[in-house]
Amino acid sequence: MQAIVDACKAGRLAANPVVVISNNGEAKALERAMAEGIPGYHIGSAAFPDPDELDRLITNTLLEHEAELVILAGYMKKIGPYLLETYQGRILNVHPSLLPRFGGRGMYGRHVHEAVIAAGEKESGATIHLVVGEYDTGPILAQRKLTVQEQDTPEMLAERILPVEHELYVDTIRRIISGDLKLDSYSIEQSRG
């Protein structure tokens, strides 16, 4: 999130972050949003145990702030059907591998890097994809590769992939804003799931 906010402030992205939503009240993203003057909301299942109510509250908060794109940056919960329908084809996620490999339920953070190393992969990287109903199965918008080195541990690989994720996310959003990447050309039917 901070990389995207910084790119907006520096003029590298012609965008205005309008709201930050986290399911975790202790998330650094909420602190950073406050520091940047961006409205931030903790909307989680502890306060809203009904999944439909939670889904509608998140969606309505985005609509109230006139969000045009939903950028997932560390949001770890499955997106609800109302949000998926309302923002169909406009919800982006970043994943720390070259999807479709090493994606799906439970494949996040360290788990991804452990699996990449255990499989003896020669390369990994980052993927930006559209979000659909199943984890990590939406159409791929962009990928960037890097070489997995023999001495890599999951932590070392994660440390090298994180800046790739940041750069790729900012670049992909920039391409969407400029019209170089047209989201309407990616139908949800193109998804692999």
Image (tube, rainbow, N blue to C red):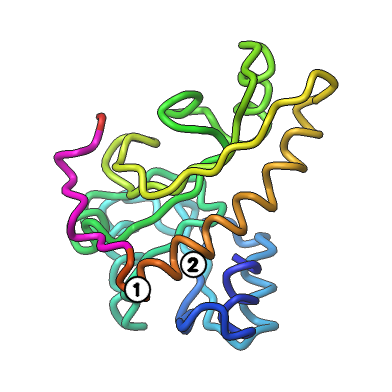
101 relative to 119 in the view: left or right: left
Q: Can residue 61 be seen from the camera position used here?
A: no
Relative to 84, say whether 8 is above or below: below
For label 1, the residue is 62
- The quadrant in which residue 62 appears is bottom left
User: Could you tell me how far apart the alpha carbons at marks 2 and 1 are, in whole angstroms?
Assistant: 9 Å
- Amino acid type, label 1: Leu
Q: Is residue 59 above or below residue 131?
A: below
Q: Does dot 1 land on a helix, a strand or a loop?
A: helix
Mark 2 vs 1: CB contact within 8 A? yes
Q: Residue at x 33, y 34 (%)?
A: 137
Mark 2 vs mark 1: which is more N-terminal? 2
The part of the chain drawn in magenta is 181-191
Q: Residues within 10 Å of mark 1 (few under 14, many from 20)?
A: many
Q: Where residue 95 is drawn, which disc sits there? A: none
| Residue wearing tag 2 | 21
Residue 165 in picture, x, y percent from top left = 60, 50
Picture quarter with the C terminus: top left
